[in-house]
């Protein structure tokens, strides 16, 4: 697989995972990997994404497989924009009144904010 394409796929996988608040460990377990490093290599662009795993991830993220492997993903629930003073990201947050859902969303937003701060998003 071409290095540039691998890099785009890796970025898409990481963005989808982080936006949904999943850990690499969770995704690895979901895919049936022995440990998280097998999945981590996908996000590092060091391993080719297997079609079987792409299908499972697309199902988990509720997107088409094509969205995971395209150069410019459109991530459901989020949109990137730029303003005169920089970049910002809009994120859809679902709340049901439960403290657990609120805490999970706060953690997710903090992770996204860290990525923006590090200019990794």
Image (cartoon, grey):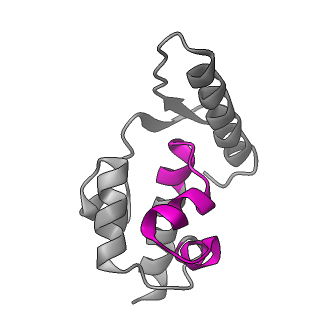
Residue 40 location in percent, x, y?
60, 72
* Residue at (62% x, 62% y) in the render: 25
**Residue 21, relative to residue 2: is it above or below?**
above
Residue 102 location in percent, x, y?
61, 20
* Residue at (56% x, 23% y) in the render: 101
Is any atom of residue 41 visible in this view? yes
> Is 17 in front, or is 89?
17
Q: Quadrant of residue 5?
A: bottom left
- How many numbered circles does the render carry? 0
**Residue 112, relative to residue 13: is it above or below?**
above
Q: Quadrant of residue 67?
A: bottom left
Q: Residue furthest top?
A: 97
Residue 103 location in percent, x, y?
66, 25
Query: Is 28 colored magenta in this rendering?
Result: yes
Query: Is 95 colored magenta in this rendering?
Result: no
Is any atom of residue 86 visible in this view? no
Q: Dominant secondary structure of the magenta stretch?
A: helix
**Residue 36, relative to residue 57: is it above or below?**
below
Locate the N terminus and report the quarter of the image it occupies: bottom left
* Residue at (32% x, 63% y) in the render: 56
Q: Residue furthest bottom?
A: 1
* Residue at (48% x, 86% y) in the render: 3
Q: Is residue 51 left or right of residue 33?
A: left
Residue 108 location in percent, x, y?
62, 36
Q: Is residue 64 left or right of residue 41?
A: left
The span shown in magenta is 15-42
């Amino acid at each position: 697989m071409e290095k540039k394409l691998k890099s785009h796929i890796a970025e898409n996988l990481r963005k989808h995972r982080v936006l949904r608040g999943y850990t690499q460990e969770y995704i690895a377990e979901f895919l049936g990997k022995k440990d998280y490093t097998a999945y981590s290599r996908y996000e590092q662009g060091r391993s080719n994404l297997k079609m079987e795993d792409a299908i499972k991830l697309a199902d988990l993220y509720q997107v088409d497989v094509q969205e995971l492997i395209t150069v410019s993903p459109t991530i459901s629930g989020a949109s990137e924009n730029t303003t005169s003073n920089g970049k910002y990201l809009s994120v859809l947050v679902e709340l049901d009144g439960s403290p657990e859902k609120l805490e999970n969303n706060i953690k997710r937003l903090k992770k996204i904010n860290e990525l923006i701060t590090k200019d990794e998003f």
